[in-house]
Image (cartoon, grey):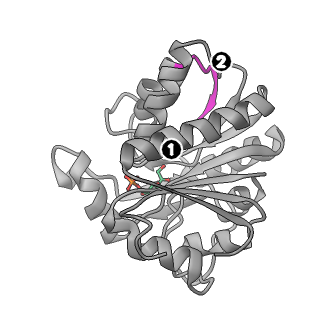
Amino acid sequence: MLRNITLHITEDYAAMGRKAAEIFAGAVKESPAGVFGFATGSTPEGLYKELAKMHATGTRFDGITTFNLDEYHPIQPGNTQSYHYYMKERVFGPLGIKNTHVPDGEATDPLAECARYEARLTAAGEMAMQILGIGHNGHIGFNEPGEAFARLASYVPLTPSTIEANARLFEDPAMVPRHALTIGIHAIMMAKRILLLASGAGKADILARALQGPITPQVPASILQLHPCVTVVADQAAAAGL
Ligand code: F6R
């Protein structure tokens, strides 16, 4: 394992959430008014539950500013599958965070929305910590495998494998949006620290390729090998290939 990567292997998903919460809360303690990057999806749900418990017993998160990695397009914020809704229910409400940013899934001009979001991110200053999950195909945010690393925020078509992976969350698979707005690799790489989470046997192969394989835009998460400070929290099943 590269020296810039600190690896914590936990027994199971619940322990992954607890370990990640301890690390995240530590970063917030160091930067109580800092900028923090959030991911959605199944993987960080355990982390968010743990943070909500910490908040209930007095830990404060309300001074931070948040930026989410991505949002489907088109999608209304009230749609229960939108990342706006996910964040409101699991993070912003339970942790009492008010200064939040999520790309606008209803933007009529998605390219202009990408430029606006990128500008807001840049103006906010250095991100203290970026939480990441990893897609089965190695995507981070919705930066899908491709010919080059997408530098800036972009409006992207989702790959068939991502649409299939996310269909489990929609009542009707045909309703999975075909596009998303995502921050780019540049903003992710500019974060002071990365907290990458992975859970389950289905992520074992891609996690090993991301952390130990060649750095290639075919595996977008492999760029993290070039980041100076990455903490990986993976349960045993996801860490099996490392
Ligand atoms: C979501 C995101 C995605 C997910 C990835 C893994 O905001 O950025 O990159 O982290 O698709 O999703 P789960 O955790 O559902 O396996």
The percent coordinates of residue 214 (x first, y second) are 60, 87
**Amino acid, disc 1:** Thr
Rounded to the nearest whole Å, what is the CA distance between mark 2 and mark 1?
A: 36 Å
The crowding category of the residue bearing disc 1, from other C-alpha atoms within 10 Å (few below 14, some 14 to 19, many at least 20), is few
The percent coordinates of residue 160 (x first, y second) are 31, 70
Work out which quarter of the rendered image holds the N terminus and state it.
bottom right
Question: Which residue is label 1 attached to?
Answer: 108
Left or right relative to 89: residue 149 = right
The crowding category of the residue bearing disc 2, from other C-alpha atoms within 10 Å (few below 14, some 14 to 19, many at least 20), is some
- When asked about the image quadrant of residue 15, the answer is top left
- When asked about the image quadrant of residue 226, the answer is bottom right
Residue 129 covered by magenta stretch: no
Q: Residue at x 71, y 31 (%)?
A: 28
| Position above or below: 87 against 149 | above
The percent coordinates of residue 101 (x first, y second) are 62, 34
Q: Residue 42, can we see it?
A: no
Q: Residue at x 41, y 49 (%)?
A: 43
Question: Which residue is label 2 attached to?
Answer: 60
Q: In the structure shown, which secondary structural element does the residue marked by tag 2 occupy?
A: loop
Query: Of residues 6 and 86, which is closer to you in this image?
Result: 6
Q: In the structure shown, which secondary structural element does the residue marked by tag 1 occupy?
A: loop
Q: Residue at x 47, y 33 (%)?
A: 48
* Direction left: furthest residue: 172
Residue 99 covered by magenta stretch: yes
* Direction front: furthest residue: 11
Which residues fall within the magenta stretch? 95-101
**Amino acid, disc 2:** Arg
Q: Which mark is residue 116?
A: none
